[in-house]
Image: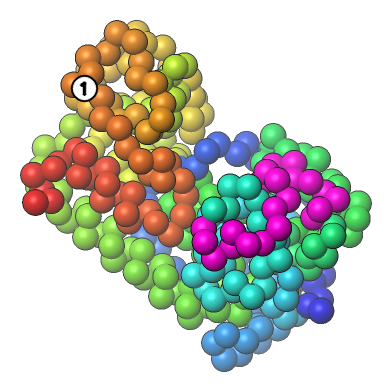
Amino acid sequence: MARIDLAAPGIALVFLACACGPQENGPPLGGDEVDREVHETEGEAQRGTRLTDDAGRTHRFEEAPDRILSLVPAATEVILALDGRKRLVGRTDFDTLAAVRSLPSVGGGLEPNLEVLLELDPELVIRYAAESDPGTPRQLDRVGVPHFAVQPESVQDIRRMVERLGAILGRTEAAARELEELDRRLAEVEAAVADRPRPRVAYLISGRPLWAASEGTFVDELLEVAGGTNVFRDLPAPYAEVSLEALLDREVDRILLVEGETAPPGVPSNEVTTVPGYTRSPSLALPEAARTLAERLHPEAFP
């Protein structure tokens, strides 16, 4: 069994929005938050790895955990991409990928079923750094189950998550390759629309009531990559409710509405374009999401 020592001077509780933010192209690996004392060959544990998670906890990993439970679908996807399927012992109801569908579910990512979770005997739980779910970390602390918090809201958050999970799994080179490919494909989308007029766009995660994506979300960043300008970058939260009057006052050229949501009343239907739900989900599929948004905004650039 992997040995994990936790030093927890305190938890900075953070609000969990539904995922978003602007792209930063810093070095994919080797940030200040990762201190690797011993480097080993790719695919093996990296002894003495210290990481700080998105809740402010410092963790020390002597070897890669053999039994991991991810409560964050985006983290689950990264673990799979880093060849960590054999280490996963469970999933949430929102993990629908075929590779993990046979695993037992602990319910939601927030406030999971603790009884089922403990039956799975995880050595490490990957959880949301969510102010809306203070009970889960308290319960895990109480029963002595180590947990590592992630908060994938911006592109840089997602990059950090890939880096950290790569370090935990001893797959830093694979993580670096994933990040390099992610950056390359985002750059391709950005280049395809670079010389085109930038429409003013409102990205709505809900039409009734109206909820829009603002600055600090990966959606906002992907709109920039896709050749648009987010008209709601000034909202007080990453995702916030807006009025119909505010939507109409922003001189919007195109409204992007997540599929399955009801279009806002009083808005001409020809101004509303639906987008797949995955465009609002933080994951390694960011390049696909960016291209989808770019195709909606600039169809002529993708014959």
- Residue 24 in which image quadrant: bottom left
Secondary structure type for disc 1: helix
Magenta span contains residue 212: no
Q: Residue at x 75, y 65 (%)?
A: 124
Residue 5 is situated, as x and y percent measured from the top left of the image, at 82, 70
Q: Is residue 303 visible?
A: yes
The amino acid beneath tag 1 is Glu
Q: How is the image coloured?
A: rainbow
Read off the residue under disc 1.
271
Q: Which residues are magenta?
A: 97-117
Q: Is residue 182 left or right of residue 250?
A: right
Residue 292 is situated, as x and y percent measured from the top left of the image, at 27, 46
Q: Residue at x 8, y 44 (%)?
A: 300
Residue 74 is situated, as x and y percent measured from the top left of the image, at 53, 55
- Residue 299 in which image quadrant: top left
Asked if 39 appears above or below 92 in the picture, the reply is below
Q: Residue at x 43, y 52 (%)?
A: 155
Q: Residue at x 60, y 39 (%)?
A: 16
